[in-house]
Amino acid sequence: LHLGPCRYTHMHLRASLLGGPATRSPAPLCAAGSPLFVLSLACLIDSEQEETITSWRAAGSLWPDLTAATCELEGTPGLLGARKAWSGGSWDGLQGTGAGGLPRWLGAKLRQLRPVVGSSLDSVLLLRLCAEEALAAGPGKRPLTVGEMS
């Protein structure tokens, strides 16, 4: 972000960021007339894993039978609605359970659905949908794909 010629001091910049007045006039932030560039000061975090585990715990409280049955599912994660590409072309990263007892295939599927999640409630409901689809899968029936859900 280019703000134009530099006329600001450290105190001016700090005052504008903190919302307070500049009380003194220290040395200029940059030479007069030189361009001033400001980088984003926002803190970006990846909350996907925490939200997925929290959704898993909420689903376990709301529907304990569903989450217990989901944990007991065995077989190739592909039959449960996962794709090899999500773990670098191998089923190994999608088998077993991860943090909080969340099946890894289910966590990977929820990670793929993350762009359609508007709130934490959406995440819990999508988790339930994925679990029910995996439990209902069988001969002639397959779970919904990520593209069909989003």
Image (cartoon, grey):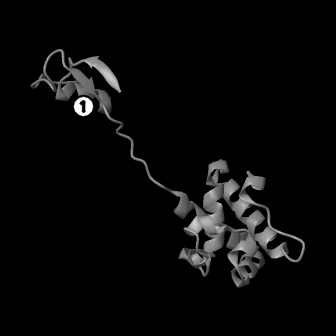
Q: Percent x, y for residue 52?
A: 59, 64
Numbered-mark total: 1
Can you tell which quarter of the image residue 138 is in? bottom right
Q: Secondary structure at mark 1?
A: helix
Q: Residues within 10 Å of mark 1 (few under 14, many from 20)?
A: some
Quadrant assignment for the N terminus: top left
Q: Is residue 52 left or right of residue 1?
A: right
Q: Nearer the viewer, residue 64 or 6?
A: 6
Q: Residue at x 63, y 58 (%)?
A: 112
Q: Nearer the viewer, residue 124 or 33?
A: 33
Q: Is residue 86 left or right of residue 7?
A: right
Relative to 150, say whether 28 is above or below: above
Type of amino acid under label 1: Arg
Q: Percent x, y for residue 6?
A: 21, 19
Can you tell which quarter of the image residue 22 is in? top left
Relative to 36, say whether 132 is above or below: below
Can you tell which quarter of the image residue 148 is in? bottom right
Relative to 84, say whether 20 is above or below: above
Residue on which the image places disc 1: 14
Q: Residue at x 64, y 62 (%)?
A: 110
Q: Percent x, y for residue 116?
A: 67, 49
Whether residue 54 is visible: no
Most distant residue in the front direction: 89
Q: Residue at x 90, y 72 (%)?
A: 140
